[in-house]
Amino acid sequence: MPNRPTMQPQAYPFSREITKYIDNFVTRLRRGQVVESKDIAIETASLMRHVISDTSLESVDMLVDLIKAVGRRLVEALPRELLIVNAFCWLLHVVREESESVEFVEDAWASGKPQPPSAASPARGAETPGMGVAQAGALRTLTEQLASRLDVETMTLMGFKKNILNEINEYILELENIEDAIAKNALEYIHSNEIVLTCGRSLTVAKFLLKAAAKRKFHVIVTECAPTYAGHEQARALAASPNIDVVVIPDSAVFAIMSRVNKVILGTRAVMANGGLIAIAGTHMVAAAARHHATQVVVCAGPYKHSPWFPFNDDRFNSLVSPDAVLPYREGDLVNNVDVISPCYDYVPPELVDIFVDSMGGHLPSYLYRLLQENYGDAKDLAWNVYDS
C-alpha cells in the first residue's frame, strides 16, 4: 500500500469547559455509554459546535487543523467507529466549501482599484507641517485601505464561522429527524399482505415498518439474532401496531422461511464506499439466503452512515465481545479445547444488496459514489490519515 501522509495532532488552547467536554465524550465512548449510531453522530457534531464556538479563529487553515486534531483524539478513543470520521469528513467538506466564498470576497477586494486621493478633505491629524496637501491625501488613502483590509478579513472570518455553526445546527436537526425522513418512503416499498423479514433491532427499520402499517396490513418475520436476542425487542416494538402480524424465528430457520418472504428490509451500522454493509451479526446470512431465493433486499440507512472507505480488511471495523453467551465458561472441558469468536458485526458484500433507502429516496448501490462526492467531496482524503497511528 502506498505511503500516505500522517496527520499530526496539535494542541490548542481550549477553554477548561471545552476540554472537560471533550474528555467526558471520549470517556463515554471508551466505556461504551454512547452506542446508538445517531447518538454518536449527534454528539460528535455537538462537540465540534462547542469547540468552534469557543475558539477565536485567525484563519481557515486554523479551523481545518483544529477539526483534524479533535478528530484524531476521538478516533483514538474508538478507532472502529466509522460514524465519527464520517462526521468530521462532512464538516471538513463544509469548511472547504465555505472557505471558497471567503477567498472570493478577499480576492474581489484585492482586485478592486484604490480610490484616488482626495485633495479637498485631508484626514485631520494625517498631515504634518512639512507635508503638502497631495502627500497628506495619499497617506490618508493608504490608512483607509489598510483599515478596510482588516475590516474585510474580520467580517469574512466572522461570517465564515457563523455559517459553519449554522451548517452544524442544520446537520444535528437533520439527524434528529432522520428516521422519520426515511420512513416517509415506506409506502413505496411495502404493500398490503406482504411478508417482510428483518434482522435484529433497528430503530430506523422499526419506524419504516410502522409508517407503512399506518395505512397497510402486512406480516413481519423477525430473526432473534442470538446471542443478544435483539430481535425480541424489535418484535415488541412492531407488535404495537394492530396492522402488523409479528413472528419471531430462530436464526437457523432463515433459509427455510425465505422462500415465503416477499422482501427483506435491513438496518446497518455503516455503508462502505463500494456499497457493502457493516451490520449486526447475522445480517450476512439473511442477505445470502435472500439472494439464493431472489428476494429483494432493501437497506434503510441515513446519509450520515455513508463512509468513504473501501473494506480492504473486513475485520478492521469489527469488534469482538465475550463468547460467554455462545459457550458459557461453566463448560470447562469444552472451553479448553476450542476457540470461540463472537463478532459484533457482519460484512455484507454489495452484490447482496438491491437498493438503499435514505431521506432522499431509493438508490442503487452503484450510485453511492455520487452521494459520497456530494457529502464529502475531497474531504474524504482525511481517511488516509485518521487510521494511521
Image: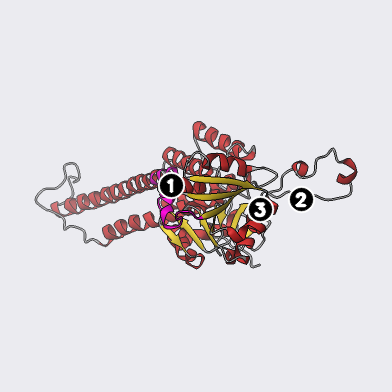
Q: Name the residue under label 1.
A: 211
Where residue 318 appears, as percent x and y from the top left, is 66, 52
What is the distance, in whole Å, between disc 3 and disc 2 at their CAs?
14 Å
Pick whichever, 47 or 140, lies toward us: 47
Q: Is residue 328 magenta?
A: no
Residue holding disc 3: 282
Q: In which quarter of the image is residue 293?
A: bottom right
Q: Nearer the viewer, residue 61 or 280?
A: 280
For the N terminus, the image quarter is bottom right
- Which label's residue is closer to the chain start, 3 or 2? 3
- The kind of residue on which mark 2 rests is Ile
Determine whether, in the image, residue 383 is placed left or right of residue 105: right
Tell me the amino acid under the disc marked 3: Gly
**Three-letter amino acid code at the position of disc 1:** Lys
Tell me if 158 is positioned left or right of 274 in this view.
left
Q: Which residue is drawn at 71% across and 48% down?
A: 320
Along the line of sight, which residue is nearer the eye, 333 or 26?
A: 333
> Real-space Cα distance between discs 3 and 1?
25 Å
Within 10 Å of the Cα at label 1, are there few (<14), some (14-19), or many (20+) other Cα atoms?
many
Disc 3 + disc 1, Cβ < 8 Å: no
**Residue identified by numbered label 2:** 341
Give the extent of the magenta segment: 170-194
Dot 2: what SS? loop
